[in-house]
Image (cartoon, grey):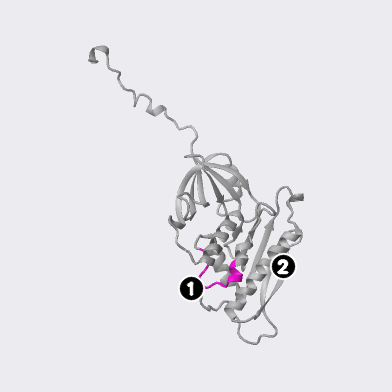
């Protein structure tokens, strides 16, 4: 996709981080939150300069949630710029979604924005657990975790080299998967989990934003079949992540009584063997 100068209403973007379980009360370190907030603002500034051909916007915090590493940033016209301005958030959102879905960085994106997106989820699972980012209270929340970080780094490398080709399928597809639900993290708007596939015991990273929390808890540790949007990275035939849309329990002990005798084979007598 090519980036064009598309008119967007000025908007807002939300960032929330979640702390590691071993931190006090699962809190987020102040230096980590400040660093990620700065990375996001640097990306927004690069997008502003690209879409408006000059610095035209300022970024102000309009909501900072008490006792939580969450902030809402509004973009407002610079007092010194009297020209019509275009929102920078549209370009940032397009890139975040494109990276998450495995399509890479949008063609024409400025390098500073690409680098900010490559860095924003750095150290997930190390210095913080994960984050969430959304635009204008959009229903679509993107989870910033180690999965996003891997995709962003790969996209940034491809962006720098100009290489976009992959040998295997890269993108998203709906599919059904059978396995056991493990290691659930229910914090935030997008719970995460692991699905241990019945075939081969391969562990798949999952998000469960479409499921009710009680449904996730009810099936924890059970064998299930899921309908999911699978994200493929072009390097493996297995998906890198599943976005589970629905699930159902698989009966653990199938009732085989009705088949009793159906597969009994008559062993030949000695007289029949020659």
Q: Position of residue 4 (x, y in %)?
A: 51, 77
Q: Position of residue 140 (x, y in %)?
A: 57, 62
136 relative position to 256: left or right: right
Determine the residue located farthest toward the front in the rendered image.
Answer: 161
Residue occupying the point 48% across, 64% down: 163
Residue 98 tag number: none
Element class at badge 1: loop
User: In the depicted view, which residue is nearer to us: 56 or 158?
Assistant: 158
User: In the depicted view, which residue is nearer to us: 120 or 198?
Assistant: 120
Q: Residues within 10 Å of mark 1 (few under 14, many from 20)?
A: few
Q: Which residues are magenta?
A: 104-114
As for residue 109 lying within the magenta part, the answer is yes
Residue occupying the point 75% across, 60% down: 31
In this rendering, is residue 126 above or below 76?
Answer: above
Q: Position of residue 102 (x, y in %)?
A: 50, 60
Q: Main secondary structure of the magenta part?
A: loop
Q: Position of residue 265 (x, y in %)?
A: 31, 22
Q: What residue is shown with label 2?
A: 63
Inspect this view and state whether residue 137 appears. Answer: no
Residue 2 tag number: 1
Q: Residues within 10 Å of mark 2 (few under 14, many from 20)?
A: few
Residue occupying the point 75% across, 57% down: 29
């Amino acid at each position: 996709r090519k980036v064009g100068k598309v008119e967007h209403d000025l908007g807002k973007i939300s960032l929330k981080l979640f702390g590691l379980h071993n931190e006090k009360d699962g809190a987020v370190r102040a230096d980590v939150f400040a660093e990620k907030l700065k990375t996001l603002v640097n990306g927004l500034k690069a997008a502003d300069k690209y879409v408006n051909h000059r610095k035209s916007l300022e970024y102000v915090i309009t909501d900072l949630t008490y006792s939580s590493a969450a902030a809402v940033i509004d973009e407002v016209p610079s007092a010194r710029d009297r020209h019509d301005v275009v929102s920078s958030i549209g370009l940032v959102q397009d890139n975040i979604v494109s990276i998450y879905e495995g399509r890479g960085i949008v063609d024409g994106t400025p390098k500073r924005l690409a680098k900010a997106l490559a860095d924003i989820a750095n150290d997930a699972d190390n210095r913080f657990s994960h984050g969430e980012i959304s635009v204008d209270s959009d229903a679509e929340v993107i989870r910033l975790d180690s999965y996003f970080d891997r995709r962003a780094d790969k996209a940034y490398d491809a962006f720098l080299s100009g290489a976009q080709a992959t040998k295997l399928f890269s993108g998203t597809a709906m599919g059904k998967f059978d396995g056991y639900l493990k290691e659930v993290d229910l914090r935030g708007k997008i719970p995460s989990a692991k699905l241990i596939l019945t075939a081969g015991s391969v562990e798949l990273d999952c998000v469960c934003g479409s499921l009710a929390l009680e449904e996730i808890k009810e099936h924890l540790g059970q064998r299930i079949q899921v309908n999911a949007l699978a994200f493929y990275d072009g390097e493996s035939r297995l998906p890198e992540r599943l976005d589970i849309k629905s699930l159902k329990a698989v009966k653990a002990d199938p009732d085989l009584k009705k088949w009793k005798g159906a597969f009994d084979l008559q062993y030949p007598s000695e007289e029949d063997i020659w």
